[in-house]
Image: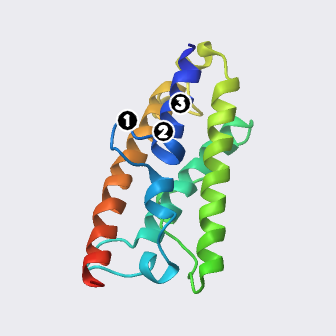
């Protein structure tokens, strides 16, 4: 299996369908919660909705680069989630996340392995491999947060 295929598989595992590392994934954690739950604030923690938006923000930014565009995302805007005031709005955010995740993985699978050692946008960002690995690790980091915040929210409702 090529490096890019392996990376795409790892990416899909954390977002869409895997159980290997964390015994869960974003889709498992986010598919059974309401918009009221995901917008519930627990202390100073980010909301579940903010974390889902944050991850999609970075995925969409990398997709733009994969498709030949510029790196237009900025950390300062990565939590700028528009208000979610209905289940429909929450489901739209989820659908965008699932669609972007699959698009990211598909574009990654189409890349030649040699691309992994090329500079990603600018020398200061390192290689494509470093950025793709970083994206997967970033997703697992926030998956852990989502899992814990979700447990806190559900325990308050019991």
Q: Nearer the viewer, residue 113 or 12?
A: 12
Q: Is residue 20 visible?
A: yes
Q: Say the numbered circle drawn on residue 13.
A: 2
Residue named by callout 1? 20
Point out the tag, 1 or 3, that comes first from the N-terminus: 3
Q: SS at mark 1?
A: loop
Q: Which residue is mark 3?
A: 9
From the top left corner, tell me how far across and down residue 29 is, in percent: 43, 59
Q: Residue at x 37, y 54 (%)?
A: 142
Say whether marks 1 and 2 touch (CB < 8 Å): yes
On residue 123, which mark appears?
none
Q: Secondary structure at mark 2?
A: helix
Q: Where is 20 relative to 64, above or below?
A: above
The alpha-carbon separation of the residues under discs 1 and 2 comes to: 8 Å
Question: What element does badge 3 sit on?
Answer: helix
Total labels drawn: 3
Q: CA distance from mark 1 to mark 3?
A: 11 Å
The one nearer the camera, 103 or 31, is 31
Q: Specify the quadrant that holds the N terminus.
A: top right
Q: Position of residue 62 (x, y in %)?
A: 60, 43
Q: Are marks 2 and 3 in contact (CB under 8 Å)?
A: yes
Quarter assignment of residue 20: top left
Q: Is residue 144 left or right of residue 93?
A: left
In the rendered image, residue 88, in percent from the top left (x then y), is placed at 65, 78
- At label 3, counting other C-alpha atoms closer than 10 Å, the crowd grade (few under 14, some 14-19, many 20 or more) is some
Q: Earlier in the sequence, mark 1 or mark 2?
A: 2
Q: Neighbour class for label 1 at 10 Å: few (<14), some, many (≥20)? A: few
Quadrant of residue 82 in the image?
bottom right
87 vs 20, left or right, is right
């Amino acid at each position: 299996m090529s490096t890019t295929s392996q990376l795409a598989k790892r990416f899909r595992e954390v977002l869409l369908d895997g159980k290997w590392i964390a015994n869960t994934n974003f889709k498992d954690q986010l598919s059974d919660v309401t918009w009221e739950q995901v917008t519930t604030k627990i202390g100073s923690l980010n909301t579940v909705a903010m974390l889902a938006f944050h991850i999609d923000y970075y995925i969409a930014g990398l997709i733009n680069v994969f498709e030949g565009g510029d790196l237009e995302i900025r950390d300062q805007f990565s939590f700028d989630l528009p208000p979610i005031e209905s289940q429909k709005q929450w489901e739209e955010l989820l659908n965008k996340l699932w669609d972007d995740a699959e698009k990211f993985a598909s574009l990654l699978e189409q890349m030649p392995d040699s691309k992994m050692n090329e500079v990603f946008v600018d020398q200061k960002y390192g290689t494509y491999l470093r950025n793709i690995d970083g994206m997967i690790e970033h997703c697992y980091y926030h998956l852990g947060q989502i899992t814990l915040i979700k447990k806190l929210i559900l325990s308050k409702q019991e």
